[in-house]
Every structure is written in C-alpha cells, then in structure tokens.
Image (cartoon, helix red, strand yellow):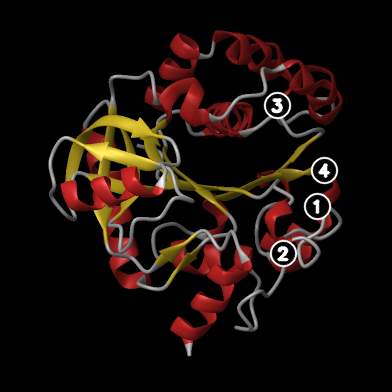
Amino acid sequence: MDGTHIVIMAGGIGSRLYPLSTPERPKQFLDLLDTGKTLIQMTVDRFLGLAPITNFWVVTSASYVHFVKEQIPDIPADHILAEPCARNTAPCIAYACRKIAKKHPDACVVVTPADALVTETVKFRAVIAKAIAFADLNEAIVTVGISPTRPDTEYGYIKATRKYQNRVVPVAAFKEKPDKATAESYLADGHYFWNAGIFVFAIPTMLRELKAYAPQITGQIDRLEPYLYTPKEQEMLGKLFPLCDKISIDYAVMERSTLIHTIASHLGWSDLGSFSAIATAKSALK
C-alpha cells in the first residue's frame, strides 16, 4: 500500500448559487458559511487527520489554479491538476488516478467534492477510515451514504442491500433525484441513503473498472500517461483531455460495476446547493 491520497474535485462553477457563485469565482473558493474559511479549505481540514497535505490532490479548471495555490499553499504544486476544459467527473477521476498511480501504484484514494459541508467531522473521519480499510483489503469501491433526515428531492440516492449504519455493505442500486412521493417511500424503507459523491478505492481497482466500463476515456489517458510529470504534460493534456467522453463517474462506473459498496451514517452533511441550504447550514454552525 502506498498510503492514502485525497483527491478533491474543484472544477465546478456552482451555477445554482449565481450570482453569489460565478464562473469567475465559484462557490468552492468562497467563505459561504462565514467561518473564516472557504469551502475547499474546510474540505482539506476534515481530511487532514487521514492523510498528510503532501498526499492531497486538487483537480480543477486551469482558470482556478491560482485560487488553489492561494487557499491551500502547502499542497505540492504538481498535485494541482489543471483541466483544460470541463468533461465531468469520470475523466477527472481517470486523470487523477493515472497521475497518482505513476508514483504510487498501490495507493488507496478518497475522491471528494470540494464544496460540501460536514459538521460531524470526527464521525466523518471514522467512517472514511473504515471505508479505506475495507477498500485496502477487498476489491471494492466504497461510496459514502448519508442517512436521510427528510424526503429530499434534490439528492440522488444509494440503495443499500442492508440498513446498517457505519458498516460497509454492498450497493443494490443508484437512484436519480426522486419526486416527493418516491423520496417519502425511500425514507420509510430504510435502505436508501443520500449520495454524497465521495468514493474510496485502491488505485488498481478503479483503473480496472474504468478500463472495463469507460474504455474511451481510458484510451485517451493511456496516450497521456507517458507525458505525466514531464514538461509536456499540460500540452498533451490540452490535446487529449477534450477528447474524453463527457460523463459522470456515476454513469460511467458506479451504476455498472459489481464492486460497489457503501457506508452510511449521520454526518451533518449538505451539498450546499441552494440558498436555503446555506441558510440552514449557517444556523446549524452557530
């Protein structure tokens, strides 16, 4: 094992929060909760107990690299991966995994969005630690589920095979954002959890699943691989990355792979995707 590496996806523009969040300065680089820290800084803080900052990576737009350098000054410069264009999360994760694998082929990786809130940080670290341990010993991709507190129609759901909290169990299905009646049935059923978009896996496992279910993307990253950590990396990335299929990791791998598991808990999580969610989060933090 080559240690645990944290990959923070920070390329989104936060369009649902316009004009507070703009393409020029999206929400992950804002102090939306009046804590004195931006959302990406809060994300780094909650993972620091699980890996050193030298094992952190940020995948972001080339136009946001300066924000990352300003707000996370201790992250190694070559761990800031600058996408030349937005191609959704599957190419993002494929690029990050291949870059890490070049020097750390057996690493365990945690992929996380940059712009969510978790208030139960101690419990969160324990949940992630369990997911890492499971992924280290098993050929599995572990998602983090959030125990729902209401029949929310704005989140995707994970259907688990068992109702256990704080234990890794196989996933039965992923469900898109439901209507109100369906969300109420999910809440009553007890097998359904909000999808936090956090994934834990060993590098070889994810690379195999990407090759099996997203071969077009893998093909472009294969062509890029010889140039990683060289002066030509950014030039070749600019040529090859735009050729990758524009698809989420959920559609490309998670909904198709037989290796998906989940660990669910109450973590005080929110994706902060609306002005009302921000107001609720501010109240919770007071």
Q: Amino acid at mark 2?
A: Phe
Residue at image location 49% in from the left, 24% down from the top: 251
Nearest to N terminus: mark 2 or mark 1: 2
- Residue 46 vertical placement versus 113 (above, below): below
Residue at image location 75% in from the left, 34% down from the top: 86
Where residue 57 sits in the image (x, y, percent)? 60, 48
Disc 1 + disc 4, Cβ < 8 Å: yes
Nearest to N terminus: mark 3 or mark 2: 2
Residue identified by numbered label 4? 62
Residue sitting farthest toward the bottom: 286
Where residue 21 sits in the image (x, y, percent)? 76, 62
Q: CA distance from mark 4 to mark 3?
A: 16 Å
- Residue 217 vertical placement versus 272 (above, below): above
Residue 280 in sight in this render = yes
Q: Quadrant of residue 37?
A: bottom right
Nearest to N terminus: mark 3 or mark 1: 1
Which is more toward the observer, 146 or 38? 146
Which is more toward the observer, 33 or 181? 181
Q: Amino acid at mark 4?
A: Ala
Q: Quadrant of residue 69?
A: bottom right
Where residue 265 sits in the image (x, y, percent)? 25, 58
Q: Secondary structure at mark 4?
A: helix
The image's mark for residue 228 is 3
Q: Amino acid at mark 3?
A: Leu
Q: Nearer the viewer, mark 2 or mark 4?
A: 2
Residue at image location 68% in from the left, 64% down from the top: 72
Q: CA distance from mark 2 to mark 4?
A: 14 Å
Q: CA distance from mark 1 to mark 4?
A: 5 Å
Residue identified by numbered label 1? 64
Q: Secondary structure at mark 1?
A: helix
Residue identified by numbered label 2? 29
